[in-house]
């Protein structure tokens, strides 16, 4: 039986989610200068590469929709992915947190914490930002000063090159297992985090709901922490 942090579950086949949602403050102003893709209504720069939209804070890493599409066509894009876990008193993984997310098209999918690394941002800061965005400010992730990924996942738009696939881009993802100790309050398009034992998290049934190879990523994560029996 799945235990929930908040919200509801739906059992259905779904598409791979957009791993970097549009982030906005309460006024609707975009907060993340490297926001998600596949969404409409974003400001566009003045035509120069990396130029911020009018009225935004200057950031040399800002990309308009057109610029981001061109970068994705030519360059690998760096991501971080985090698999949140609960641990017992001796550090053994007891539960794995799987997100229920709504895509920009209104579809529901199971996924993990994931998103791009901003220009000038450390990997640790990117991890903390995406964990807070998806799990809320009270999740209290335990991040060491120098996080070490359990694997590097390469997502290709061409099927068959690796276990991971993303038809939008070539993405290089640093993947981490991150213990969380606080209360999860999923935000933005993360509707729910479902906590389940490692054996259920690596099940074929769940893997079928996580396209793009993320089911394999969870198996690698659990193997890296000795949670597979």
Image (tube, rainbow, N blue to C red):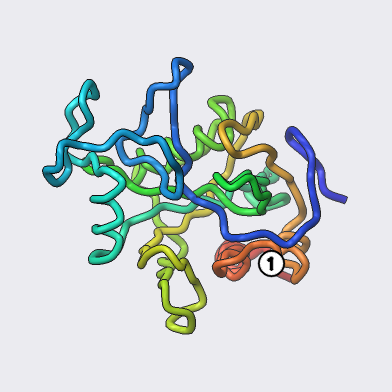
Can you say whether 226 is above or below 4 in the image?
below
In-image side of 94 versus 54 (left or right): right
Q: Residue furthest bottom?
A: 160
Of residues 148 and 216, the one nearer the viewer is: 216
Q: Is residue 45 visible?
A: yes
Of residues 51 and 193, the one nearer the viewer is: 51
Residue 74 percent across, percent down from the top left = 23, 66
Quarter of the image for residue 214 reads: bottom right
Of residues 200 and 24, the one nearer the viewer is: 24
Can you say whether 94 is above or below 25 in the image?
below
In-image side of 23 versus 198 (left or right): left
Element class at badge 1: helix
Q: Quadrant of the C terminus?
A: bottom right
Q: Is residue 90 visible?
A: no
Residue 83 percent across, percent down from the top left = 57, 52
Q: Which residue is mark 1?
A: 207
How many residues crowd mark 1 within 10 Å: few (<14), some (14–19), many (20+)? many
């Amino acid at each position: 039986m799945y235990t929930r942090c908040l919200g509801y579950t739906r059992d259905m086949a779904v598409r791979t989610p957009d791993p970097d949602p549009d982030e906005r403050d309460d006024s609707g102003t975009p907060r993340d200068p490297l926001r998600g893709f596949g969404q409409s209504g974003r400001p566009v720069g003045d035509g120069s590469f990396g130029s911020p939209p009018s009225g935004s804070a200057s950031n040399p890493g800002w990309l308009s929709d057109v610029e981001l599409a061109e970068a994705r066509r030519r360059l690998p894009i760096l991501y971080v992915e985090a698999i949140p876990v609960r641990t017992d008193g001796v550090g053994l993984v007891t539960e794995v947190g799987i997100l229920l997310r709504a895509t920009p098209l209104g579809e529901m999918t199971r996924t993990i914490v994931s998103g791009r690394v901003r220009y000038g941002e450390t990997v640790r800061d990117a991890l903390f930002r995406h964990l807070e965005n998806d799990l809320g400010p009270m999740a209290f992730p335990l991040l060491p000063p120098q996080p070490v990924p359990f694997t590097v996942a390469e997502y290709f738009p061409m099927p068959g090159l690796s276990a991971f696939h993303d038809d939008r881009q070539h993405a290089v993802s640093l993947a981490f297992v991150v213990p969380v100790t606080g209360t999860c309050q999923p935000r933005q398009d993360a509707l729910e985090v479902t906590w389940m034992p490692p054996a259920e998290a690596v099940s074929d049934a769940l893997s079928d709901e996580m396209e793009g190879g993320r089911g394999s990523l969870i198996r690698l994560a659990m193997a890296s922490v000795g949670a597979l029996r």
